[in-house]
Amino acid sequence: MSTPTPETPPERPNNEPSNKKDSSVEERVDTTLPDSQPVVDKVEDKPATNVSLISGESKPRQYRVDNQSFFMQRGYQVLLVLGLIAAFFLVMVYQTLFGRIEQPAKKVTIEQGQTYYGLLPQWQQQIPLFSASVAKLYIKSQVDAPLHSGIYQLPENPTIAEALQVLAQGAKAAMVKVQIIEGKTSKDLYQTLRDNDGIKKEVLTADSDNASIAKALELDGILPASVINDSDPIVNHNLEGWFAPDTYYYGEDTTDKQVLTDLYKRQQQALTEAWEGRAPNLPYSTPYEALVMASIIEKETSVAEERPLVSAVFRNRLNQGMRMQTDPTIIYGMGSRYDGNIRRKDINEKTSYNTYQIDGLPPTPIALPSAASIEATLHPADSDALYFVATGTGGHKFTNSLAAHNQAVKDYLKVMREKKAQAASQ
């Protein structure tokens, strides 16, 4: 009897899971492998990392350490990063040397002692990616002379490279020295500029006077009406005190108008800054009155530490309604009549400036005060002194009473007699 051939079961799709066991056929899987035959060839001695726990794949991934595409990708990434760094650096260098600041063409004044490095903050504030380090390296490589003081004409919207090119010409350009000593008068300043052959004359002509100078400089507005309209020729339109004393250097062919305007702006700035931070309870109602007082302090002492004390004396006297009684005001009011001596008749003469004969301040300053004297005027010392007199040995003696002051005067006269006798014996 023939045995029937079993029917082949139909194939199931690959994506259909088979969790059900055939009841009639039970498959056995022999998991035991012979030692002599491995399942797969090893790629390397180390076992492949089983990533099935992470990736969910049923087989571990295997990598070859000599995969060239892996290293090529890493190389491209490194090159890309280096390229970006190089591009950023090039942009930074370009912006530093050729980035422009927005400003009109103008003249700039370089003070004595300034350096090229001191010019960098202006560019650094206005130009994105400006690098002070790059600029310093450029200056070091391109400039072989120090920055010379003077007035320079910068072009409109300059780059740092263009500015350095202009400023480097200072070493070759002839500079004109203008020296105005503290305590000198505006009249002295005018004569200094007239005598300087390197300064072009536009304002200080042969027939110029106070009124024409003030008009040419367009400075009428800074003077009180009482000064503009005063009949005294010394007072009328007098710009005394409005020019900052110092030593300056200007390029040849600079005009007297440019110099005077520059000095006025400096003095105005010093006065404005000191006035804004002034001490309380001062007897000055305007900055101009403070400028008048500063000029008197400038003439009364050349000792820096005495300025606040002299300021305190005059403040105290004005607050108490006392006359200032200061000799330099007598001298200024005498004008060209002053011959080096003050006589009793000069003290008794009532001029516009003689503070022995008038109350309060004189109508204008009597000299060109320094910034230090302006500062002392608006920040007097904490002192009750009402008098001071020279000691004869340098400086002054400050006292609170008339009796003490009179004794200080006697001491001064004694010192002067001894000096005179000593000089005669030699």
Image (cartoon, rainbow, N blue to C red):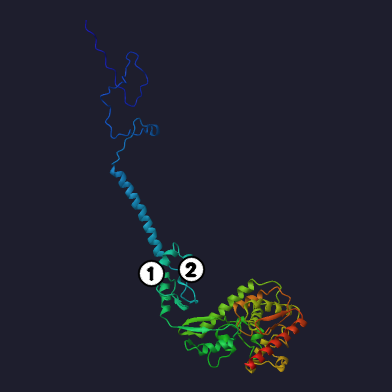
| Residue 419 or residue 56, whichever sits in front | 419
- Location of residue 28 with respect to 190 vertically, above or below: above
Mark 1 vs mark 2: in front = 1
Q: Amino acid at mark 1?
A: Ser
Which residue is found at the position 39% from the left and 32% from the top?
53
Disc 1 element: helix
Q: Splitting the image into 4 quarters, where does residue 369 fall?
A: bottom right
Q: Position of residue 15 (x, y in %)?
A: 34, 27
Residue at the far right: name it: 403
Q: Position of residue 421 (x, y in %)?
A: 67, 92
| Residue 3 or residue 155, whichever sits in front | 155
Q: Splitting the image into 4 quarters, where does residue 424 fall?
A: bottom right
Image quadrant occupied by the C terminus:
bottom right
Q: Splitting the image into 4 quarters, where does residue 314 fall?
A: bottom right
| Residue 133 or residue 393, whichever sits in front | 393
* Structural crowding at the residue carrying mark 1, measured as other residues with C-alpha within 10 Å and reported as few (<14), some (14–19) or many (≥20): few
Q: Position of residue 194 (x, y in %)?
A: 52, 89
Q: Which residue in the structure is indicated by mark 1?
A: 141
Q: Amino acid at mark 2?
A: Gln
Q: Earlier in the sequence, mark 1 or mark 2?
A: 2
Q: Residue 122 has which mark?
A: 2
Q: Position of residue 239 (x, y in %)?
A: 60, 85
- Location of residue 36 with respect to 290 vertically, above or below: above
Left or right of 255 on screen, residue 241: right
* Structural crowding at the residue carrying mark 2, measured as other residues with C-alpha within 10 Å and reported as few (<14), some (14–19) or many (≥20): few
Disc 2 element: helix
| Residue 196 or residue 91, whichever sits in front | 196
Left or right of 94 on screen, residue 308: right
Report the Cα–Cα distance between label 1 and label 2.
21 Å
